[in-house]
Amino acid sequence: MQIVSIFLTGEEAETFAPFDHDDTHVVFDRLTGHGPRRIAEGQVWAFIDWVLEDMSGLELCRRLRRDPRMADAHITMVLDGEDKAAHDEDRRRALKAGADDYMIGPVDRHAMLDRVFALRSPRQQQRVARVIELGALAIDLGSLQARWGGERLALRPNEFRLLRFFAENPDRVLSRQDLIAGLGKQDPPIDERTVDVWVGRLRRALQQAGAGQPLRTVRSLGYVFDSE
């Protein structure tokens, strides 16, 4: 089954439940100035409001275009629906900042999904396979394999996704709740102790491949993947 990840800057993103449509699994999450909170899997769509609390939508669009996690994202700028006269100029500015297209807000869930499924094509559904490299670590998202110094890591699906999330957020302390959210495991709720089991398995796989201990525990806070 294919995955479509939809990220929104509005709070409503946290109320949208994942669902299946034909052979596609659609997931939603909130998008902030720091980028996506969870793994951006499959075909990625981002809907950015023109006006945000901590920055402009244009600035967030520029940041996403520099973010490797969102390299293949289709970005839609949601323009303010009240100022009709400014739409042409706003549209030009949005496209110049890196947006793929625009919509006039407010945009509800149905309008957003109509846009996603209307613009998807067989060609677009096949994302270019990406390799995440971090020192001796290489994660091939096409083959779903990870290697350390050329040595293949024996990982279960959850541990593979966990390693990817760590590699996309290196040198950053991640709490257990951060990891649960990053892997999209909030519903049904996951016990935080389950995260410790995943981390333990991942550590053993890294050690067996000769990686040593790049995954460090920060007491009372969580875990951090050291890039050096």
Image (cartoon, rainbow, N blue to C red):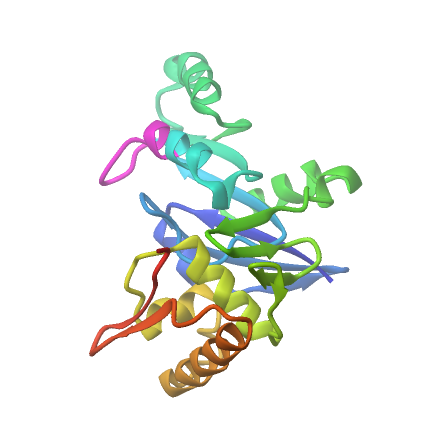
Magenta segment's dominant SS is loop
In the rendered image, which quarter is residue 24 located in?
Answer: bottom right
User: Percent position (x, y) of residue 201?
Assistant: 50, 81
31 or 161: nearer the eye? 161
Question: Is residue 52 part of the magenta span, yes or no?
Answer: yes
User: Percent position (x, y) of residue 126?
Assistant: 73, 44
Question: Is residue 46 part of the magenta span, yes or no?
Answer: no
Side of 164 relative to 213 (left or right): right
Side of 125 relative to 182 (left or right): right
User: Percent position (x, y) of residue 172?
Assistant: 30, 58
73 or 67: nearer the eye? 67
- Who's the residue at 79% across and 42% down the image? 122
- In the displayed structure, 97 sits above or below 199; it is above
- Who's the residue at 39% across and 13% down the image? 85
- Who's the residue at 41% across and 12% down the image? 89
194 or 139: nearer the eye? 139
Residue 120 in view, yes or no: yes
User: Percent position (x, y) of residue 196?
Assistant: 39, 83
Q: What stretch is highlighted in magenta?
A: 51-60
Which of the image's four quarters has the C terminus? Answer: bottom left
